[in-house]
Amino acid sequence: TIISGMGELHLDIYVERIRREYK
């Protein structure tokens, strides 16, 4: 899976994008 190393970074960006779209 690609969530081995870039998982943390991707999660941060994903959460920020969802949080911004949820406002």
Image: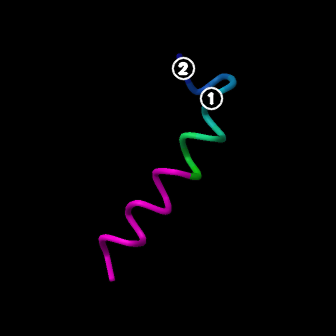
Where 10 falls versus 18 (above or below)? above
4 left or right, relative to 23: right
- Residue range in magenta is 13-23
11 left or right, relative to 17: right
Where 12 falls versus 21 (above or below)? above
Amino acid type at image mark 2:
Ile
Magenta highlight on residue 8:
no
Q: Please provide percent x and percent y for residue 21.
A: 30, 70
Name, please, the residue furthest toward the top: 1
Total tally of numbered discs in the picture: 2
Magenta highlight on residue 15:
yes
Q: Main secondary structure of the magenta part?
A: helix
Q: Please provide percent x and percent y for residue 22.
A: 31, 76
Which residue carries the number 1 mark? 6
Q: Residue at x 49, y 63 (%)?
A: 16
Secondary structure type for disc 2: loop
Where 8 falls versus 5 (above or below)? below
Q: Residue at x 69, y 24 (%)?
A: 5
Q: Residue at x 54, y 40 (%)?
A: 10
Amino acid type at image mark 1:
Met
Where 16 falls versus 4 (above or below)? below
Q: Nearer the viewer, residue 3 or 10?
A: 10
Q: Are marks 2 and 1 in contact (CB under 8 Å)?
A: yes
6 left or right, relative to 23: right
23 left or right, relative to 19: left
- In the image, which disc is placed on residue 20? none
Which residue carries the number 2 mark? 2
Q: Please provide percent x and percent y for residue 2.
A: 54, 20
Mark 2: few/some/many CA within 10 Å (<14, 14-19, 20+): few
